Amino acid sequence: MLRDKRILLIVGGGIAAFKCLDLIRRLRERGAAVRCVLTESAAKFVTPLSLQALSEDRVYGDMFSLTDESEMGHIQLSRQADLLVVAPATANLLARMAGGMADDLAATVLLATDKPVLAAPAMNVRMWLHPATQANVGLLGARGTMFVGPNAGAMACNEHGPGRMAEPLEIVAAIESIFAGKLTAGPPQARLAGPDTIELPGTRSEGALTHRPLAGRKALVTSGPTREAIDPVRYISNHSSGKQGHAIARALAALGADVTLVSGPVAVADPPGVRVVRVESADQMLAACRDASPVDIAVCAAAVADWKVANTADAKLKKAPGAKPPAIDLVPNPDILATLSAPGPDRPALVIGFAAETENVVANAIAKRARKGCDWILANDVSPATGTFGGDDNTVHLVTTEGAEAWPPQSKDAVARELARRVAARFA
Ligand code: PMT
């Protein structure tokens, strides 16, 4: 599909510029010709020589080079391309594009072109979420610029969230969509494709322009089991896998929330774009929740042990021939959900718990919501036959002050997305 297509790649000055090397390779593999324009700051991240070697073409950067202007003016650069791709599209480059600046070759080409433009933004999460950048992106989208990304995830600046440049193959997929006529120039005409994402027409890319109703909101999610030590090698725990809590953290982050996930020991992967704090015991989980507070939203999906061992042994308990097994005294653990729900200046605006029940599921959950003082509780049946603990699916009732609402059986991911959607509606 890309055979003989001519791509003018405008490389902005950001750490993600290194991904352009792979992007060029992927485009060339598909038969496209790639010509590069480099901003002055981009040249600090990738060398013209490497771009030239991979593209097998000259690399342009200096608007005032007389040779370039006579042989290949900025109008020619755009005229000889089928598509302009800006990657990484830094906050500065997007602002210059939105402002119609022509202060270097990259901006001038972008101002002078009548060809479709695809931008792959990459910047610090706060820069991306800044109203100025969002306004620039909106303006450019309305004028016909298409976007791929940014993706959410860990960033070079040690922050998490949206701002990572789309991966080279995602950019290639977006380019192919443009040439297939599925991703057309013009305003984004966003359509709601699901609870997480607003996709541009014709794309299914994770890097599609995202809808972030929870941007600026802080969320705390607990997930997984706790382990309460008996001695240095033994503990009391349960079968929670963390799948439900992690899915909720992921769903809230996908809607733009700044999420801290406090997780007991689990084997599931960290959700992208989420700050993960790993703990073992209920005491540690409570301390981590306090450290993450204040937040706007708290969701307690962890299966916290109700009791801990009164006197944890410092050394491994030994079996002695003929001796009785040791008695283990239990004392109550702190109730994290009730603690977060307690009235006070730092109480989250919305506190959501889970009720893990094996009988009278809804009635017990209604009583539990009132007892713990949370706003909503999701009641789920955890009888072994349901497979809720550790499984991929969940059947829940949402219990609020207004009553109980039965949700259909669905995947834990779908439960998480529906919950995140309700949370977003609550804050709208
Ligand atoms: O992890 P998975 O395998 O995906 O399974 C998901 C799940 C079944 C663990 C999850 O859907 C769930 O029900 N989590 C809550 C488990 C639980 O401890 O329920 P509970 O009814 O005992 O507690 C009620 C609420 O109080 C929960 O929100 C719990 O997180 C919280 N709690 C309980 C005790 C305690 N000491 N501190 C708490 O915060």
Image: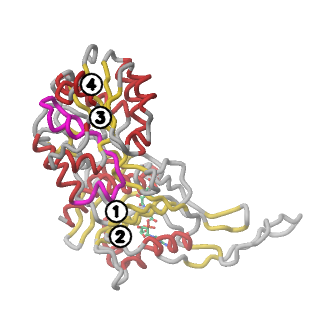
Q: Is residue 21 left or right of residue 181?
A: right
> Image quarter for residue 105?
top left
Q: Are marks 1 and 2 in contact (CB under 8 Å)?
A: yes
> Image quarter for residue 6?
top left
Quadrant where the N terminus is found in the figure: top left
Magenta residue check for 115 = yes
Q: Which residue is mark 2?
A: 364
Tell me where residue 349 appears, x and y as whole percent: 28, 74
Residue at position x 56%, y 57% in the image:
265
Residue type at the position of mark 2 = Asn
Task: For marks 1 and 2, give the CA distance.
Answer: 8 Å
Q: Is residue 424 left or right of residue 17?
A: left
Choose mark 3 or mark 1, whichever is in front. Answer: 3
Q: Between disc 4 and disc 1, whose residue precedes?
A: 4
Q: Of the numbered discs in the image, which one, if any, rests on residue 4?
A: none
Choose mark 4 or mark 1, whichever is in front. Answer: 4
Q: Which residue is mark 4?
A: 7
Q: Which residue is mark 1?
A: 379
What is the residue that sits farthest to the bottom in this orientation? 344
Q: Between disc 4 and disc 2, whose residue precedes?
A: 4
- The magenta span reads 106-131
130 or 102, nearer to the observer: 102
Is any atom of residue 116 visible in this view? yes
Tell me where residue 428 appears, x and y as whole percent: 17, 64
Choose mark 1 or mark 2, whichever is in front. Answer: 1
* Colouring mode (rainbow / by chain / secondary structure / one colour): secondary structure
Task: For marks 3 and 1, give the CA distance.
Answer: 52 Å
Tell me where residue 353 appears, x and y as whole percent: 36, 67
Disc 3 secondary structure class = strand
Q: Are marks 3 and 4 in contact (CB under 8 Å)?
A: no
Residue type at the position of mark 1 = Ala
